[in-house]
Amino acid sequence: MAAFINKLLLVFLILQNNCMCHENALSLLTRYKQNPWTLPSSCPQNRQPEKPNSLNFKLDVRMPGVTPLTSDSYFCTFVPVPSGQKSYIVDFKPHASMETVHHMLLFGCSKPATNEDYWDCGSSYATCLYEAKVMYAWARNAPPTQLPTDVGFRVGGSTGINYIVLQVHYGDITAFRDNHKDCSGVTLQMTFRQQPLIAGIYLLMSHDAVIPPGEKVVNADIACLYKQATIHPFAFRTHTHQLGQVVSGYRVRDGKWTLIGRQSPQMPQAFYHVEHPIDIKYGDTITARCVFTGKGRTTVTLIGGTAKDEMCNLYIMYYMDAKHAKPYAYCMQTGSPELFKQIPPEANIPIPVSPDMAIHGHHTVKDSPDENVILQQPKREEEVVLDQVSHLEEAIDWPGEKLELGQVSGVALDSKTNLVIFHRGNHVWDENSFDHKHIYQAQGIGPIQYNTILTLDPVTVKVLNAVGANVFYLPHGISMDKDDNFWVTDVALHQVFKLGPKGDYLLILGEAFQPGSDSNHFCQPTDVVVDPIRGNFYVADGYCNSRIIQFSPNGKFIMQWGEESSLSGIPKPGQFFIPHSLTFVPILDQLCVADRENGRIQCFIAQSGQFLREIEHPEFGARLFAVSYTADNGGLLYAVNGEALVGKGVPVQGFVLNFTTGELLDIFKPSQEDFLMPHDIVAADDKTVYVGDIQARRVWKFVPAEKAEHRSVKKAGTGMEMHEIDATETFLEAEIEGKMRAPEMLRKHKTNSVLKQSSTAVSPVLITLLLIIPVVMLVGIGVFIHWRKGKTYGGKSSRGLNLGNFFASHRGYSRKGFDRLSTEGSDQEKDDEEGTDSETEEYSAPPIAATTSSS
């Protein structure tokens, strides 16, 4: 009986029921008179909403101008929902900053605790007069929450939810020293349109966890047998106080544990998206584990509502069929040790959070009541290792054999982390490839006859699958979905393809060789990525249109956003100068874009296209080619930059960034050579990173330093490069590719050539000859060119020596003339020989006349 009473008290504490909200009229009047706050005219009003003019409308729930006087204050306000009929909440947009607000909660109530404009709901007052149903939570600058299509929280009518109550927790009140008024809150996007799927919250919470002082690891386990209609979890939120290290939720069915969600409660306590679709049926067991540490505490810590107490909560946001809808349920049953012997090991591994990411606002309890000190999550011993991202080093003996590749335009990983390469075979993109209307000029040569999509074993480099022959003209971006289908773009065809694992056509968007800017056409699309949860996909379009397009899983146009940034001035959010690469962040439903010529990463809410933030570092320089995301270490971004178009610029290299903070954690590059033009990047959860280099026609592999084999001298004959060529040939090919900017490039290749041979016994005489012969050849060529120019100036029609014609018959070039094999990121340099401006492949800096797309 005592245990049952304790459970009821805990529910009472967490939901802040009506037991504390009865007060006589005299005390209410006294509180009104003592209230130190006034309502600023700038804050929105929260009373009965205006009658909507359409099926869709918005409802603001905002604080009416409050100034908390003490830290850890909780204030509530309310707004009625439209009366007389049911309506549905389909979107939550927060208006708050972590500088002033620790967290916000929204509750559905039949009646609020009082009829005041706002009230103290942290001590003697509650949120709702009767049952409070949690509907939404926000903390630490979390992004907006949008529910899946056809899903909504049902309110009004006969639902019993007539009011929405906002509870705001003001942690540290330092920001209120100027006595300003706070209007934090949430805007609800609502509709009268009946939703076939109803959202709800399933709350798992521990009521009896005990954390001894100094104990390194303490687990709190919760488990309940589910006995209702099927629900579909789509988001989750974790909650503890300072001692929580990780909270994990699982469905157990027939002895198999399936992850619902796992997160550090020291991260922003928002609702994170469930990564993989999952359902919970009658007879399943829903479980949760909270991992705590008692280190740093000198007394026992119990479950409770104060700063010195702890909590173990997992909120699961789900949807279910409307006819079975149950908007709220909870589980407080302690899980049996026998059951939790089978919990996956990941549930016991803390998720590291750096101190600058720790959630502030809870205060330590001091002997002196006047000492209010912000408590940050203490650095744990485990975090000393986990929180540091290992430096990436090149796997120098990889791939260990030659791979005959064309220009490597894209790299990806399949569901088994096999490496997928997208390359151009014998096709190239040069200044003659497109006319001024972006029409591909080499249609007559036909598609690439080789397999352009190769799936390789990442260790042995064995080709596991090869498809894509006789399909593509100029491959560009590639990504994989959870079923290992290939999603690719072709800039010559102006199309997006979905191919099955065997290369069969599953979906084709766009019209072949027809550029455009409407919903049915693309113009040189650069990349495509798939939302693994909803199945929607996103296309970066691209070189001409500077937009992001969202499509349904079957290819139906949904929406687009973005515009071209100007050639001068500071680019604005949502503007692009070649959106070149995409990566999807499933846990937050965000889409991040490598905005190439603006040298930055922009992140958006995937479903709405709303701009969230940009990440920019001086180390990026002016150009950023590609970006990739992994969920390890709390979320990491990997990126590669490109050579500067003007001046020397910054080094070309790769970057590792903290996704949440944007902090630059690591910089990496090849150990023995240089990136030539890294074009795409992809990272695995084990921190292995692959970079596709379009000019070097190879893929670089990088691994954490502790996994790398350190060798001072490269083995002879390992085939480390995709193409082994000598220094003179490298120089000439670089000239043809439009990459030759100065004699220092030649010196670099000569140096590399000498270093490659350093492991063999080469005599000084041979080295001298190798250095002298190219010089003699160049002098001879210079004399010959001077003689030919003299004849031209004398009235002859000769055009001078064309190295492209000379090498065309030897290297299988597709066209005659001075063929630029890879001007993908090159300048619009002036050609000293011809005296004309060369265009650029992939239009790194489009000519002024070409900057205005057909849209």
Image (cartoon, helix red, strand yellow):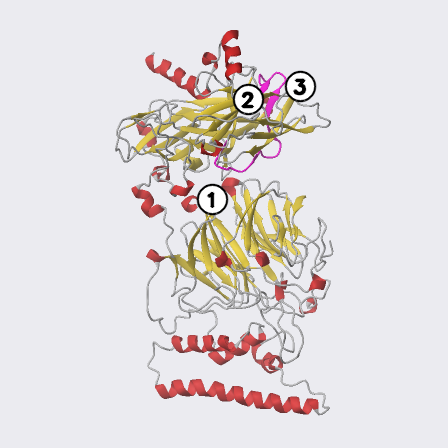
Q: Secondary structure at mark 1?
A: loop
Query: Quick one: 717 or 491, which is closer to the camera?
Result: 491
Which residue is more in the foreground, 366 or 528?
A: 366
Q: Is residue 157 above or below residue 788?
A: above
Q: On the rendered structure, is 421 left or right of 762?
A: right
Disc 3 marks a residue whose amino acid type is Gln
| Image position of 307 with respect to 667: above or below | above
Q: Mark 3 to mark 2: distance in Å?
A: 23 Å
Task: Provide the residue designation for mark 2.
Answer: 77
Q: Which of the two discs, 3 and 1, sits closer to the camera? A: 1
Report, in whole angstroms, how far the alpha carbon at label 1 lies from the one at label 2: 31 Å
Residue located 40% across and 78% down the image: 754
Instruction: Say which mark, if any, is on residue 660.
Output: 1
Q: Which residues are the magenta region?
A: 138-163
Up-down relation of residue 672 to residue 665 (above or below) = below
Q: Determine whether label 3 and label 1 are within 8 Å by CB.
A: no
Q: Which mark is residue 180?
A: none
Residue 646 picture location, percent across and down:
57, 67
- In the figure, 628 relative to 474: above or below? above
Q: Residues within 10 Å of mark 3 (few under 14, many from 20)?
A: few
Foreground: disc 1 or disc 2: 2
Q: Secondary structure at mark 2?
A: strand
Instruction: For label 2, count other residues whose C-alpha is less than 10 Å away and answer few (under 14), some (14-19) or many (20+).
Output: many
Query: Mark 2 is on which residue type?
Result: Thr
Q: Nearer the viewer, residue 24 or 248?
A: 24
**Does the magenta segment cover residue 129?**
no
Q: Which residue is under mark 3?
A: 85
